[in-house]
Image: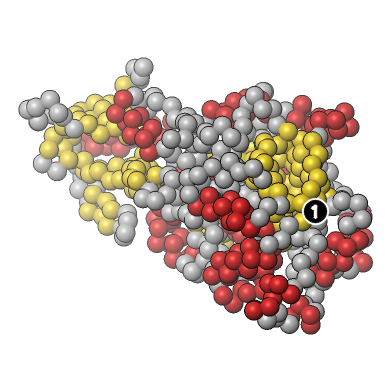
Amino acid sequence: METDLRLESSLWVGNKRYRAVLTGWHFNWTEVDKKNRDKKTISVPVAEVVGVEEGRVEILPQKLFEDRDKDFTVFYVKRSSGGGSSGLLWRLGRTQFSCPSRVLRDQWTKHLRTALKTHSPLRPHRLLVFINPFGGKRRGRKIYHSVVAPLFELAGISSHVIVTERANQARDHLLKKDLTGFDGVVCVGGDGMFSEILHGLIGRTQQEAGLCENDPAVTLQSCPLHIGIIPAGSTDCVCYATVGVVDPVTSALHIVIGDSQPLDVCSVHHGPALVRYSVSLVGYGFYGDVLAESEKHRWMGPLRYDYSGTMVYLSNRSYAGIVQYLPADPLLSSPRDKTRCLSGCSVCSRSTERLFPNPSDSGSLYSSHFSQFSRDSEGEWVSVEGRFRCVSLTCMSSSCPRSPQGLSPSAHLADGTGDLILVWDTHPLGFLKFLYRHTSTEDQFDLPFVEVHRVKAVRFFLPSGKEEEAYEEIGGQNGGMDEEERGYLETASRSGSQQHLTERDTGPEMTMEQKTATPFLCGLCCRKSPSVSVWNCDGEILPFTEILCRIHGQLVHLYARGIEDGTAVHNCSEESDMCERRCILLK
């Protein structure tokens, strides 16, 4: 119960008189001149107040100011339905109050600003912003300057803006430049820009901690800087899966109020080296083939993914492989329990206590988590062998507007596990049913040829006798590795390998055989089916077949709070100020 009463008085909004009350955690105003009992009350959590300005002020769509010495304007978060999205849209609410005197106006502005500092300690004060001017529809600069920058200015946030001119510029900056004084890093772009920020921050943190990223058994240090995502790309999967909508204003407001959402990260290793980090998808088979095929048709734009998906489906491919996985504790959660990871998720909250039992040890994972890769745990691994349509590992639901439930609807953002999805070889209509269910609410795992497991680590390698054939095919697709690269993998250094691998060219020029297009009419029946596929790692092709993946619990933090459930938020506002949001059963 709140007893910390700060200020109470009569205020006017337009021609109506309200009784305004500022307590420790809420700012409420109730209409007092109404004769009936149905009096309108508006309650705003102090943590969701964006800013307070003297006078009558507007910020969006453009800044307008009218100086009145007895008025002040309060800006706050206002929610609305996300339409077809799974989350809620946030908008900038604005209410102009009039006071009987300037002294009272100054009291209100002072008390509100003090409450913001007291009850919102995680709000950022200085941000490093990277804008990708080429992503999506090339609207990154416009989105930032017209929508995001005014909100940052209102909240008193200073920012250092860098417009990138080349690939990996943001990652290189984070690895090499001084980051002192910044509270977080914001990317204005799509999933590709986010991946750059992710690799740069994780790499920088491990360098400063003296840790070797190449060793999958090493417990990585959690990144101290938060990451903010302003969606402005052709794909915004990470934003959609962590916020529930793809909307720049919503994302900017999450950054402004200092929301914090921990996020699991998967490290992908080949031999003695780290290859990449992933948060949404590491996929072999169908998803790898679609990405590889789409690279041949970049001139088609986003349409290339639909075209490539159709072509790969019609080719009816499956691949031999051996999958080994380290199961997570089935008593904690299950990928088939039909829960959703929503804001305030109880599964993720319990995982925080399990991963970080000592609050002062939040920079590293619980020591028992490390032992899973020791030799003593080899007997815990489960091994399956066969032919697969696709093998997928995801650390989140990987939902998007075209697939609202995602690859794994019950996956969690921050429980220290990933969901391994195995689709065994089956007839084409069965696989089509599996793909179609991603676009509907039907259970895509309720099929006899589909398995899903909650795991802490995954290995994939080829059956005996397939390695040489795989090397030749992968070498042909990627131009092969030169002696320098091969030597690098054999002597991977402590500095981390992803800096080297991501700087590699995509490979030498395509061979004449690859450049020669197969006639469409006979391509599907005459083309030789490859014996191996490639890995799709968050939209990047990996030039290796045999990999080891490990899930690192809550390695990074985003300026987000997870997907808000509209029904729960509505009930919160009507029934209880201290209502907690939690995972709910899917209807």
| Residue drawn 53% across the image and 34% down it | 338
Left or right placement of residue 268 versus residue 239 in this view:
right
Quarter residue 219 falls in: top right
Residue 582 seen in this snapshot:
yes
- Position of the C terminus by quadrant: top left
| Residue drawn 25% across the image and 34% down it | 42
| Residue drawn 76% across the image and 49% down it | 268
Name the element at disc 1. strand
Q: Nearer the viewer, residue 279 or 467?
A: 467
| Residue drawn 65% across the image and 51% down it | 281
Q: Position of residue 247 (x, y in %)?
A: 43, 54
Q: Position of residue 76 (x, y in %)?
A: 34, 42
Residue 51 seen in this snapshot:
no
Q: Nearer the viewer, residue 518 or 24?
A: 518
Give above or below for 71 relative to 587. below
What residue sits right under mark 1 in the picture? 320
Q: Position of residue 250 (x, y in %)?
A: 42, 49
- Position of the N terminus by quadrant: top left
Quarter residue 65 falls in: bottom left
